[in-house]
Image (tube, grey):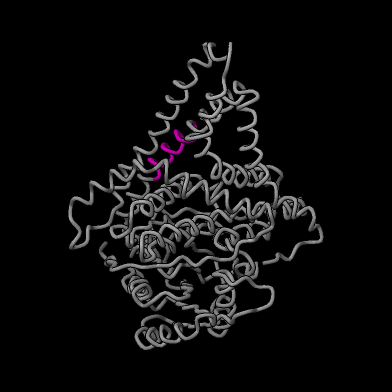
Amino acid sequence: MNYPYTPESRWYRFFEMVPGMLIWGTFFAAVILSVARPLWVIFFIIIFDLYWLFRVIYFVIFLLYAWGKYQKALTIPWLSVLKKDHKDWKGMYHLIFLPIYKEGMEIVEPTLQSLLHANYPQDRMIVVLAGEERASEHFKKIAATVQKKYKNAFFKLLITTHPANIPGELASKGANINYAGHAAQKLIDQLHIPYEKVIVSAFDIDTIPHPEYFACLTDAYLSHPNPTRSSFQPLVLYNNNIWESPAPMRLAAFSTTFWLMAELVRPDRLFTFSSHSMSFKALVDVGFWQNNIVSEDSRIFLQCFMHYNGEYSVTPLYIPVSMDTVMAGSIWNSLVNLYKQQRRWAWGVEHFPYMIAHFWRNATIPLGKRLKFLWIQAEGMYMWAVASLMIFFLGRVPLWFVQGHDRGSLFTYNAPFILETLLNCTLIGAFVIAILSLRLLPKRPKGVGGYRYIYMVLQWLLLPLSLILFSSLPAIDAQTRMLLGKYLGFWVTEKERKSVSVPSKKA
């Protein structure tokens, strides 16, 4: 895959390499200096662990605060609030994109059923089932079934087929919904609906929104002082098939959910992630989702941020949407898919050179904002790749090489105890999310024994190993590929589930 570089292509390529150079520079320096200057490395590791401890503390604080807002959001009758606060709410339409590749009706049907069970008028929903010509035979069968069963269920049902091998495109979800977006624009123009009256939700095909999601989203949109300059990010729960999935998949799912939950409390630093919503006007203004990248879900925020000269933000929604954990038949295939999913998410490092290129050319965006978002992106990607290895492994290496007078020094003698204490303190975060994860579990399906709750607790003992294998290593893989110019294509995560319960309108 080749990127269409800007005229400053050599500089763009250099900044693609920077994240990878930083992480490998850190690893090489840690190993070499552990031999040559072990005390330096011990001191650095202690400072690093202190920084990580502070991060864990404010993570726990923000997470508990967000948890309270999440619990409150679930108790609010959002449609009643919407009707009370906004008399013109019925003039709003929801445009819902459901991109599909090779998923079967066991995945598609619960999503469509969840839209029918939404506590919101279906005659204000335009549903777009966006298929791929690359899987045309499969999609024709799915499309025919959906058309027959749901053609009159919504205000409009639009079915699109994204052509294969369009020059300049990457075979990806972004290219699919870009094509579907243009088709939807033609339909909305024919219906003479103002773009400002259309709220877009870009979902994965396994996304099941909470019954109050669209009412909550509409209320947030109409309450916003400038709704066309904001995206809306719900809480993403990976619990459709959580009872069926193995422990590594559950750990990755809960970790992602709690990371996003804590981020929702700080909307000034939010990017869109996975399933998200936004104004159709903003989407049209920026030319829809970029069709030649992997991470279109977060890139769309940056497209809007650049287009509106920094006057664009993300509004948090504490109402959830539910998605699937990774499952792909055997445990081995599931682990491989989990690794590839995490690597695809880590490929968000492709935003770093994009941000530098656009920030350099656009001085209209305040310098403080530019530096802030660059720091959020760079620090997040760096810590994603190195933190687990630094804490659980590299921090012990310099202790092996301390010799002579240094070995007998008070600092060296206490270093293992300091590191162990710092590590134990950081486990506060793991304890908190382990407790909260039990509260996030959906109702236990029939046939699943109560003993599974024990597994749900004991699985957190695997957290250090999971963080290394399915967090650090995929991030290192992604950033190394970017460093070497071996660009990542779009990996479609396999989806499999035995059953899923669709919440009722009273949920």
**Magenta stretch prevailing secondary structure:** helix
Q: Which picture quadrant has residue 207?
A: bottom left
User: In the rendered view of the protein, which quadrant contains the N terminus?
Assistant: bottom right
Question: Relative to residue 403, is residue 497 drawn left or right?
Answer: left
Give the camera-side residue of 353 and 339. Answer: 339
For the residue pair 199 and 385, the one nearer the viewer reads as 385
The stretch drawn in magenta includes residue 63: yes
Task: Where is residue 227? Give x, y as percent.
Answer: 54, 61
Who is closer to the viewer here, 478 or 254? Answer: 478
Give the x, y percent position of residue 105.
36, 78
Tell me if I can see residue 39 in this picture. Answer: yes
- At x 37% / y 86%, what residue is drawn? 145
Residue 7's quadrant in the figure? bottom right
Residue found 34% across the figure and 85% down from its top: 149
Residue 95 visible somewhere in the drawing? no
Spot occupied by residue 313 in the image (x, y as percentages of width and height): 57, 54
Residue segment shown in magenta = 54-66
Rendering coords of residue 424 (x, y %): 40, 29
Does residue 165 appear to the left or right of 420 in the view shown? right
